[in-house]
Amino acid sequence: MNLDFTPEQDAFRAEIREWLAQNLPSRLADKVRTSKHLTKQDMEEWHAALHSRGWLANHWPVEHGGPGWGAVEKFIFEDECAMAHAPRIVPFGVSMLGPVLLKFGSEQQKSHYLPRILDGTDWWCQGYSEPGAGSDLASLKTTAVKDGDDYIVNGQKTWTTLGQHADWIFCLVRTAKEGKPQEGISFLLIDMKTPGIEVRPIYLLDGDHEVNEVWFTDVRVPAANLVGVENSGWTIAKYLLTYERTGIAGVGFSTSALAELKSVIAKTEKADDPLFAARVARVEIALENMKTTNMRVLAAAAGGAAPGAESSLLKIKGTEIRQEINALFMAAMGPQAQPFIPEALDEGYNGPRIGPEGAAWAAKDYFNNRKLSIFGGSNEIQKNIVSKAMLGF
């Protein structure tokens, strides 16, 4: 199934494509295409370029720096960026905290934090998961105890993506122990330079330092950094997670990866395998169907509604598609996908090549993307959300 676009929307696509051709550095595009490690400077460079053009916060209202796009324009932009191998927009400030502040933040919080997200002054990370609170997020243990005009925070967060670069972290903290677990959670903004915060790296299989543990020991946080009212954090958390899950679906990433997969297949013996071709066709059909669902969710968000159970459907199907594409890459390359040299994923590597084009990162993407169906709420949890919200079970 193909989506039909108006002449105006086709012209908009051409504008995006031309701008990317002129402003996306080939060095960055090549690093993204070959899954090389991006530095903080790489991500900041692309953030600044999009902000300069006014396209960074493309789902924010115009009065707060958004471009005023509808669902179709946002879809086209993300699709073209993925096909051009642009770095992803780091989501924590722009796509997660931004919408939360716009809906739940005070006027003072909006006026202070939103411009700093846009211009890159503040780099944010997310403090949700804990060792005993992943998909069962309501069981979190990190506490925030009121002490005059401050909260005293103690506890631990884990799997904190890019926390080593962050200036600030938005955290779910427990402010009450009575009643249901969900009723005692608050949403707090914490300066990462505050005494008592320790960031410990977690290194992945490919040697990349992407995630971290963050420890809080008697960290003093101004009560003015509370978003919304005390003990309303679960409502805010659910609102934010619907945006995160929609992003995890990765429609643009899958579109780009599928095109790359077809290019790789054409150079292997799998090009003449009808059973393998059928697997590729199935994932392509699923992706085209998911594009339509993604458009519906974007349209609802553009109308002011938070994505509902539809975002869970996108998360489930989107992660399954991305993982299947990764598996097809590995199957197409066969034994040539097995060797792995971590240094080959660093910029400036001049060592021996590993197999055909793409072999250096096929295994890395396959193993790293196993996490997609787990973080942001595991797919099993998403199916429970869908059954309860849409089927009444």
Image (spheres, grey):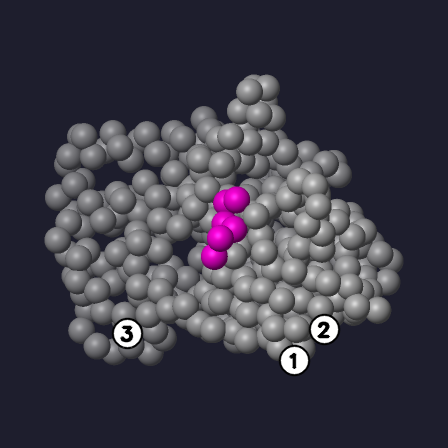
Q: CA distance from mark 1 to mark 2?
A: 8 Å
Mark 1 highlights which residue?
A: 195
Q: Residues within 10 Å of mark 1 (few under 14, many from 20)?
A: few
Disc on res. 343: 3
User: What's the magenta bit mostly, secondary-structure-wise?
Assistant: loop
Relative height, residue 81 to residue 351 (above, below)? above
Residue type at the position of mark 1: Pro
- Mark 3 or mark 1, which is nearer to you? 1
Q: Is residue 370 visible?
A: yes
Viewer-nearest residue: 136 or 273? 136
Query: Label 3 amino acid?
Result: Glu
Q: CA distance from mark 3 to mark 1?
A: 35 Å
**Residue 321, image x and y in percent?**
38, 39
* Residue furthest out toward the front: 178
The answer to the question of whether label 1 and label 2 lie on touching residues, with beta carbons closer than 8 A, is yes
- The spot of residue 164 in percent (x, y) is 52, 73
Mark yes or no: residue 259 visible.
no
Q: Residue at x 68, y 34 (%)?
A: 300
What is the distance, in whole Å, between disc 3 and disc 2 at their CAs? 40 Å
Q: Which residues are magenta?
A: 131-136
Q: Mark 3, mark 2: which one is toward the viewer?
A: 2
